Amino acid sequence: MSPFGGWGTLAAFLAPLCCRGSGEEQFEVPMEPKHLLVGSGEFQVINFTASCTDPKKLVLETALHKTFLEGQAQWKLFKVISISENMELMCSFICGGKEEMKVFNITVFYPPKQVLLTLSHTSVAVGTLFTIECRVPAVAPLQGLTVTLLRGTEILYNHTFVGTPPFPQDAVVTHNTTAHREDGHHNFSCEAQMDLRSRGGGLVHRVSDPQRLEVKEPEPNYQMVIMAIVIVLLLLFVTFVFLCFVFSEKWRRGRTGHYPVQAAWNRLRRSHRAQPL
């Protein structure tokens, strides 16, 4: 049941119409309109009151189904059910042969009945980016709706919507964050709060089911490790071949007194110079 309707709570009172003067009765209707805020599909209990001593034909006019609950000479209690759209209620009575009436506006709101939390991954490595999405289906008005993403009791992100579309729609909030080691020790949840106090209502609050995120240590990149090992081995091999060559040249010179490689290089240079142009 909506927090704005119920047997024990009179959600709206029609303002008393005052009797004045000693001869002819006169009546005064307040100028400001009354506004009723009702959850979609809920009912509203309305007390229709007149202040003159003997009012006639106290009537609540509405296209909705209404039930008379109880009443006395100056007031009547009605229950209006299945309210699903914005509309007007008209209350009238006759006092001293004069008909008076008052129009009341009903505004229907769609409270958050579900709050759905989705994690883009259920298992991530430390340092990996993941997305948290919170969806509140079919809510209205959006203005005043605050969606808060929580890690344990810590607020990760919150967003307050603005604007008042005439129809219910999904409210969606997404947040990108990086996985930390401590994330695996907390539940993630989403909280939706609809603030209707500026419209004469109250606070409607609902929380999603909690979800856990498995956080793992990052796995080593074996392909890069293998490539690094191959490069190191290749460098060692080239270095070994070069050192073998150097030491072999020294050994040859120690035995023959000259470098064969250097001699061959010198012969190649002389033959190149001797070629005619």
Image (cartoon, rainbow, N blue to C red):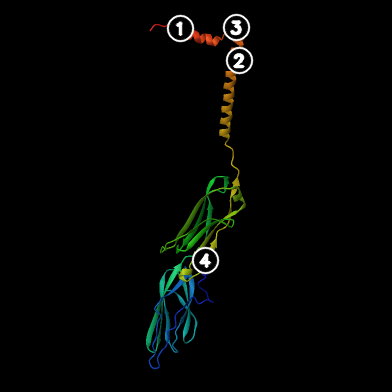
Horizontal and vertical percent position of residue 15:
44, 81
Q: How far apart in space, not on screen, are marks 2 and 3 (Cα)?
A: 14 Å
Q: How far apart in space, not on screen, are marks 4 and 2 (Cα)?
A: 87 Å
Q: Give the SS element for disc 2.
A: helix
- Mark positioned earlier in the residue sequence (2 or 3): 2
210 displayed left or right of 170? right
Instruction: Decide which of 156, 222 is in the foreground and name it.
Output: 156
- Mark positioned earlier in the residue sequence (4 or 3): 4
Q: Give the SS element for disc 1.
A: helix
Q: Which residue is mark 3?
A: 256
- Mark positioned earlier in the residue sequence (2 or 1): 2
Q: How far apart in space, not on screen, are marks 2 and 1 (Cα)?
A: 28 Å
- Mark positioned earlier in the residue sequence (1 or 3): 3
Question: Does the residue at mark 4 contact the one at mark 2 (Cβ under 8 Å)?
Answer: no
Q: At label 3, which amino acid type do we have?
A: Thr
Q: Is residue 51 above or below residue 80?
A: below
Disc number for residue 118: none
Q: How far apart in space, not on screen, are marks 1 and 4 (Cα)?
A: 99 Å
Q: Which residue is mark 2?
A: 247
Instruction: Decide which of 227, 60 is in the foreground and name it.
Output: 227
Horizontal and vertical percent position of residue 41:
47, 68
Question: Does the residue at mark 1 contact the one at mark 3 (Cβ under 8 Å)?
Answer: no
- Closer to the eye: label 4 or 3: 3
- Mark positioned earlier in the residue sequence (4 or 2): 4
Disc number for residue 204: 4
- Crowding at label 4, few (<14), some or many (≥20) Cα neighbours within 10 Å? some
Q: Which residue is mark 1?
A: 271
